[in-house]
Image (cartoon, rainbow, N blue to C red):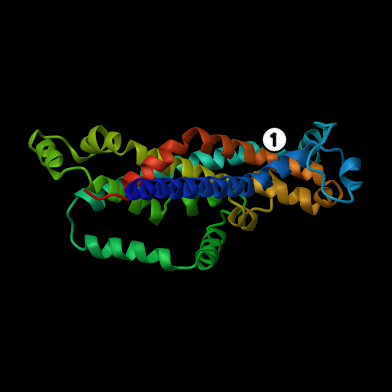
Amino acid sequence: MPEFSIDKRTAARKKTVRVLTYILLVFWAIMVVFPFYWMLLTSVKTTASYDSEVSPVFFTTEPTGENYANAFTAVPLAKYFLNTLIFTLVTTVVMLAVITLAAFAFARLEFKGKNLVFTLFLALMMIPNELVVITNFVTITNLELRNTFTGLILPSITSVFYLYLLKENFEQIPDELYKAAKVDGTSDFKYLTRVMIPIARPTLVTITILKVIECWNSFVWPRLITDDPNYFLVSNGIQELRENGLGRANVPAMMAAVVVVSVPLIVLFLVFRNKIMEGVSRGGTKG
């Protein structure tokens, strides 16, 4: 009888912990999702209804799409989208090529000073981003590459963190495969493309998605290196809306522009969230 009571109390305790855990998770989910809901809700309110609100209204019975039209007509947002797409795709493709070759060299090739060089690469992560931005700005300006896609792209074509992540993943591939390939006369490049890249695909997908998000959200560097609207990105477009007064005088239209910019990344993350988790777990596991 006492054992039965103990088991019953244990089961009740586990159930209570589970219920509390779900309550906390639901609360946290609401806290995370609410800003997106508020952004979307504000974007479909009329300016008059938004300005007339004395206290926050958490729903609207008369949604409108006029704010989205205003966002695209106030500034050439479509052109900024195209610029951002070009910047994101080119930067991501070039970076993948650079870090893949570098990660292969550090993971499989033997050369003098390899460990020292890689340690110095890792040490770069300790340098504040502000110092890097200043150095890059001076370099790009001296090369007369301001207001060009080249100037936008060059400082972003490598990443020490992504290089480290991919190198760790490459090192999980058994050395025996590499030695067997070399015995068969396989070149290093062929081994990389036929064996290592397919095995490391989840990590490469993760890096690609994270880099796309990083490029899409770029603000400081594009804002610093471009003052020609022909090279503005969507982040510049949002700032231009705000500086032109639209963000202050017409908050719903400003929120509509933010929704348009944010939705592609939200969809991208939701579609590939499992790949991101898989790639990070593979990159962080040894053996």
Secondary structure state at the residue bearing disc 1: helix
Residue at (32% x, 50% y) in the render = 284
Answer with left or right where residue 120 lies relative to residue 219. left
From the top left corner, tell me how far across and down residue 39 is, in percent.
72, 43
Residue 244 makes an appearance in the image: yes
Residue at (51% x, 64% y) in the render = 129
Residue at (53% x, 41% y) in the render = 88
Residue wearing tag 1 = 78
From the top left corner, tell me how far across and down residue 54 is, in percent.
89, 51
Query: Looking at this view, is 63 or 93 the one in front?
Result: 63
Quarter assignment of residue 193: top left
Answer with left or right where residue 241 lies relative to residue 160. right
Answer with left or right where residue 225 lies relative to residue 17. right
Residue at (25% x, 53% y) in the render = 106
Query: Looking at this view, is 225 or 130 the one in front?
Result: 130
Query: Looking at this view, is 200 or 117 the one in front?
Result: 200
CA neighbours of label 1 inside 10 A, class few (<14), some (14 to 19), many (20+): some
From the top left corner, tell me how far across and down residue 91 is, in percent.
48, 44
Quarter assignment of residue 183: top left
In the current view of this chain or complex, which residue is farthest to the left?
183
Image: 142 above or below 164: below
Image: 194 above or below 233: above
Count of residue discs = 1
From the top left corner, tell me how far across and down residue 135 is, in percent.
51, 66
Residue 91 makes an appearance in the image: no
| Residue type, mark 1 in image | Ala
Answer with left or right where residue 46 lies relative to residue 207. right
In the current view of this chain or complex, which residue is farthest to the front?
1
